[in-house]
Image (cartoon, rainbow, N blue to C red):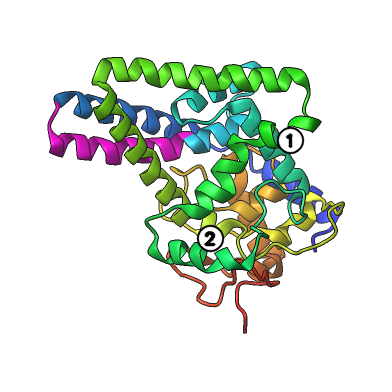
Amino acid sequence: MLTRTECQQMLTDTKALGPVRVPWEFVAGLTAVVLTLVGLFLLATGSWFATATGVALVAVGMLLFQLVLHECAHGTFFRSRWLNEWTGFLIGLWVLTPFFSFRRGHTAHHACLGSNEDPTAAPRDSARRHWLIELFVRLRIVPILYLGGVYGPYLLYDVVRGKDQKRQHLLQYSMNILAIVLLHALMTLQFGLQAYLLFLITAFWLSGILYEILFTQNQHVGLLPVPEASARYANREQANFSRSVRLPLAGLFMYFNLHKEHHLFPQLPCRYLPRIHEWLKKNRSDVLDFTSDHLGILERRKNLKLFSPTIGDHDS
């Protein structure tokens, strides 16, 4: 486990290198905007081939937008809290995610990672359904871990936790859902109800598959312990429950693949995460190797057990 002194030294050494010259989060955001606009333009042509191409472009754009939304939720996309909130809110309308509910749920994820209170924790339901989820994961055409383990819990966080939520949070959530519906209702007027809904659902589904393959299956799956519900772990301890993997063009994906580093410093802008990774590699390689082992996104962990979490990657 990392000590507090080591974590402080990591930040000191990271800041001592000066600012990162390439603001990858803005590169990712601009790429998402361009892909989405081109995809919608192709939809407007009415050609099936162009529409299929547009679906693929919008799916990648949605994936990038979700990463921008995540950065906004941490307040690290802009320096201004107001700009982060409005940008996250507007992006959330497009990617079908109520931003403030997402932010509250994601804050709980970071606060409770490794405990039963984590809203995105591995399923602990009846074993009768485990084989079905395992089958979907193997098929890779149903993003079940993304839909059921990430998207769903954040989408419904304010509803599921309704008894514990403030009344204004529930009102805010309701208005946010209404705004999402209105935006896409307006889009159906522009492109036609059937054509647009098919386009949107397909693009969202494909973005979920991409998210699952790139991130969901790698970040926390198989690493969650089963402690008491009241257990809490400090950020420096959460390195044990998160995994980082190698990813081509990682900057374009806002270094979301460096998830262990992100959980160590959730308020650190994503562009600085490679420096944290290099510090760990140089000074505490055991922390990286404990779960990550420098895996690539397509290097499947054959012995990974979704419902029987183990300490490391392999059951050997």
Disc 1 marks which residue? 161
Quadrant containing the N terminus is: bottom right
By secondary structure, the bulk of the magenta-drawn segment is best described as helix
Residue 243 visible within the image: yes
| Foreground tag (1 vs 2) | 1
The residue nearer to you, when weighing 40 against 71, is: 40
Range of residues picked out in magenta: 46-65
The residue nearer to you, when weighing 192 against 274, is: 192
Which quadrant of the view contains residue 287? bottom right
- Numbered circle sitting on residue 245: 2
Taking 93 as reference, is 285 above or below it?
below
Dot 2 falls on a residue whose secondary structure is strand
Spot occupied by residue 36 in the image (x, y as percentages of width and height): 33, 29
Amino acid type, label 2: Val
Residue that appears at 82% across and 62% down: 227
Taking 182 as reference, is 309 above or below it?
below
Residue 55 highlighted magenta (yes or no): yes
Dot 1 falls on a residue whose secondary structure is loop
Spot occupied by residue 257 in the image (x, y as percentages of width and height): 53, 52
Amino acid type, label 1: Arg
Quadrant containing the C terminus is: bottom right
Residue 56 highlighted magenta (yes or no): yes
